[in-house]
Image (tube, rainbow, N blue to C red):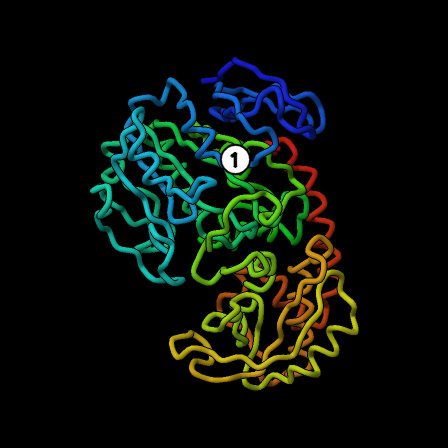
Amino acid sequence: MTFTLHTFIMRREPMRAVAAFLVLAACAQTPNPAPGASASSAAEGAAPSAQTGVVRPGIEVFLVDVPQRFRGKRVALLTNNSGIDRSGRLDIDLIAAHKDLKLVALLAAEHGIRGDAMNGVQISDETDPKTGVPVYSLYKAEDRGPTDEMLKDADVIVYDLQEVGGRTWTYVSSMALTMQAAARKKIPFVVLDRPNPIGGEIVEGALLDTNFKSFVGMYPIPARHGMTVGELATLFNRKYGINCDLVVVRAENWRRSQWQDETGLPWVNPSPNLRSLAAVTSYPGTVYFEGTTLTEGRGTDRPFEQIGAPWLNAPEVARLMNERRLPGVRFEAITMAVAPTAAKHKGLTIPGIRFVITDKRAYRPVRASLILIDQVRRLHPTDFAWTRTIDRLTGSDKVRLAIDAGQLAPLLEQWDREAAEFKESRKPYLLY
């Protein structure tokens, strides 16, 4: 079904005349205008904001005036502690208390409904103690979307989980699987959009090779895609044929150039090991250290901001890396304590390298991390090793083969070309 109510907005200008609205991507056939042109967007009206220029997440835009088609509907909500309004109030509580909506089910992705479970820990079904609503786990096993039983009472599925800008982020895979479930059940899937915390302008890395698709990468997007969850949902729905009744509630007044610390929105750890904007900024690259015998920093005080191993000559590696003068980052030799519960080097105090961001807009974490891996392997050829997860994390076997062959530089040049091509091809799916 295609909606024909139109509002016209210039993509690159602040939204003044229309300060809150919904973009309905209900059908893969809905046309999108060229970026930078006057845009004709399928939309449902919402009450205008009283504060022009204030960034408002989709939850606020949605609840200020719930569209008529959703009033009185029973809601299954996929969210966690990152689904909040500007005051820090949880979507769960806001929707449960809203007079026009009835919350009937909560869906929990990796890290659980409160976002406090560590990576890889299976999430169990439970009952939310505050609302009395059943919580159904989507992370008892990977690649699990909601079952028909979980959605038996739902008229609509609502999604609000914080995006972090990296392809390996499993919340996005849970979103795609839940969109597929909505398509099967023939009910709307509503994305309450919110800003990408590392901005919407920088794209980095190669597209996933579909022969290596997994729960840490289901569709061919780059390592750092520069899109919001609403934009990703639009891309998945239209380009990759999910074809659900998709409704994206746009965040109000966000610009692609804005990072999380420029939005005025509160910071919430999107997972237990992403504890700062610096960690999230490095994450699209430092996550690759999971696929090596170095730790990516889990179990230390700064996960994804520092890496290390007992055998690492950190001062020499830091010196060699700093000689390269990679833009926006320097490398510090440190020692770091690893918790006894960590997966790698547990209970040890080990040498490490810390990524110190000096210019977040110039920094390219995917490139920096791969160059660092290559440097460590060259300096420690007998100690360094890959683990079985490297190919699925990088989205192909090309990184492993290129570094083993001493041919990383040509691969990085190829990746830069692929990232530039994706930046152009994603334009029809951009909402800001």
What percent of the width, then of the height, locates residue 262? 62, 46
Q: Residue at x 47, y 78 (%)?
A: 338
Q: Residue at x 68, y 61 (%)?
A: 367
In this rendering, does residue 175 appear at all? no
Q: Residue at x 31, y 29 (%)?
A: 98
Numbered disc total: 1
The quarter of the picture where residue 195 lies is top right
Helix, strand or loop at label 1? It is: loop
The N terminus lies in quadrant: top left
Which of the pair 385/23 is nearer the observer?
23
What percent of the width, then of the height, locates residue 41? 58, 21
In this rendering, does residue 153 appear at all? yes
Which of the pair 406/127 is nearer the observer?
127
Q: Is residue 388 left or right of residue 141?
A: right
What percent of the width, then of the height, locates residue 289? 56, 69
Q: Is residue 73 above or below residue 273?
A: above
The C terminus lies in quadrant: top right
- Residue lying at the far front of the rendered structure: 50
Q: Residue at x 53, y 25 (%)?
A: 50
What percent of the width, then of the height, locates residue 80? 37, 48
Which of the pair 290/338 is nearer the observer?
338
For disc 1, the marked residue is 56
Q: Is residue 282 above or below residue 94?
A: below
Which of the pair 177/369 is nearer the observer?
369
Q: Is residue 363 above or below residue 151?
A: below
